[in-house]
Image (tube, rainbow, N blue to C red):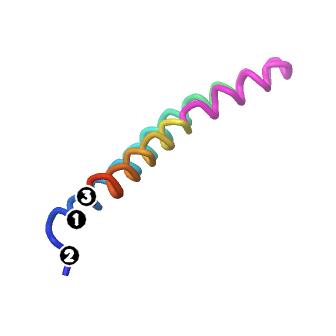
């Protein structure tokens, strides 16, 4: 039998990853559109554009770290 606290920790971990992914996707949508527009104007901007497109992915990694800490540290 699982107690109430463990279930709340699981919900919090899911929210941390899910909302971080949602926010990252919303940010990456706008950045990706601008990056494609810049690359069509000047192909030499490809490297810089890729760096800006990848930056929002770090938000998801932070959400995953928070979820893992919540499960393993708070769950103990």
Q: Determine the CA span between mark 1 and mark 2.
A: 7 Å
Residue 71 spot, x, y in % from top left: 33, 57
Judged from the image, the secondary structure of the residue bearing numbered disc 3 is helix
Contact (Cβ within 8 Å) of mark 1 with mark 3: yes
Q: Residue 2, which numbered label?
A: 2
Q: Determine the CA span between mark 2 and mark 3.
A: 11 Å
- Quadrant for the C terminus, please: bottom left
Q: Is residue 1 left or right of residue 28?
A: left
- Write down the residue under mark 1: 6
Q: Residue furthest bottom?
A: 1
Vertical order, 58 against 4 (above or below): above
Q: Main secondary structure of the magenta part?
A: helix
- Write down the residue under mark 3: 9
Residue 33 spot, x, y in % from top left: 63, 31
- Quadrant for the N terminus, please: bottom left
Q: Is residue 8 magenta?
A: no
Residue 9 spot, x, y in % from top left: 25, 58
Range drawn in magenta = 36-56
Q: Determine the CA span between mark 1 and mark 3.
A: 5 Å
Query: Which of pointers 2 and 3 lies earlier in the amino acid sequence?
Result: 2
């Amino acid at each position: 039998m699982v107690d109430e606290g463990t279930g709340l920790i699981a919900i919090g971990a899911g929210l941390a990853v899910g909302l971080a992914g949602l926010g990252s996707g919303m940010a990456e949508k706008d950045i990706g559109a601008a990056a494609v527009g810049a690359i069509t104007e000047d192909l030499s901007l490809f490297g810089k554009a890729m760096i800006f497109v990848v930056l929002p992915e770090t938000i998801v990694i932070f959400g995953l770290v928070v979820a893992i800490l919540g499960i393993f540290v708070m769950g103990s």
